[in-house]
Image (cartoon, rainbow, N blue to C red):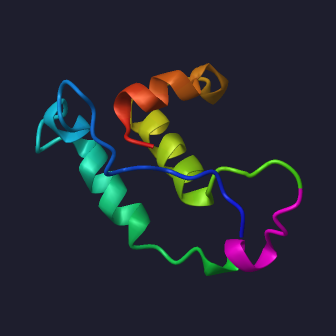
Amino acid sequence: MVYVESYKGQTWLLPPSIEELISEDHICFLVESLIESMDFSLFDEKYSGAGRPAYHPKIILKLLVMGVINLTSPLRDFSLSEAVAQFDI
């Protein structure tokens, strides 16, 4: 499979970790753990990997769930830059 890499553990110069920007009880951590626990093996089997690498379906689902939770409507207004600001992808 060829997916766009995500670096959840990536550190920054200031602050050292994105997790320091988000409170420990933020809903994004629940969404992260819930979706990470799901089985996406069928997507991996069907994805051919041809062309430009795609975002993993887990990342897309996390963005959609966070968009719904934050009442971002319509979903086309939910840009990737907003997602990056809310989620470590």
Relative to 88, 79 lies left or right: right
Q: In the rendered structure, does residue 13 fall within the stretch colored magenta?
A: no
Residue displayed at 39% across by 37% down: 69
Residue displayed at 56% across by 53% down: 5
Residue displayed at 25% across by 50% down: 29
Image position of 55 with respect to 34: above or below: above
Tell me residue 23's x, y (percent).
12, 36
* Front-most of residues 21 and 23: 21
Relative to 36, 79 lies left or right: right
Q: Quadrant of residue 41?
A: bottom right
Q: Quadrant of residue 20?
A: top left
Residue displayed at 20% across by 40% down: 19
Tell me residue 57's x, y (percent).
62, 58
Q: In the rendered structure, does residue 48 fall within the stretch colored magenta?
A: yes
**Is residue 36 in sight in this rendering?**
yes
From the image, which quarter does the N terminus lie in? bottom right
Image position of 25 with respect to 41: above or below: above
Relative to 43, 59 lies left or right: left
Image position of 5 with respect to 26: above or below: below
Count of labels in the image: 0
Tell me residue 31's x, y (percent).
34, 53
Residue sticking out furthest to the top: 77
Relative to 8, 3 lies left or right: right
Q: Which residues are magenta?
A: 43-50
Image position of 79 with respect to 38: above or below: above
Residue sticking out furthest to the right: 50
**Is residue 71 in sight in this rendering?**
no
Residue sticking out furthest to the left: 24
From the image, which quarter does the C terminus lie in? top left
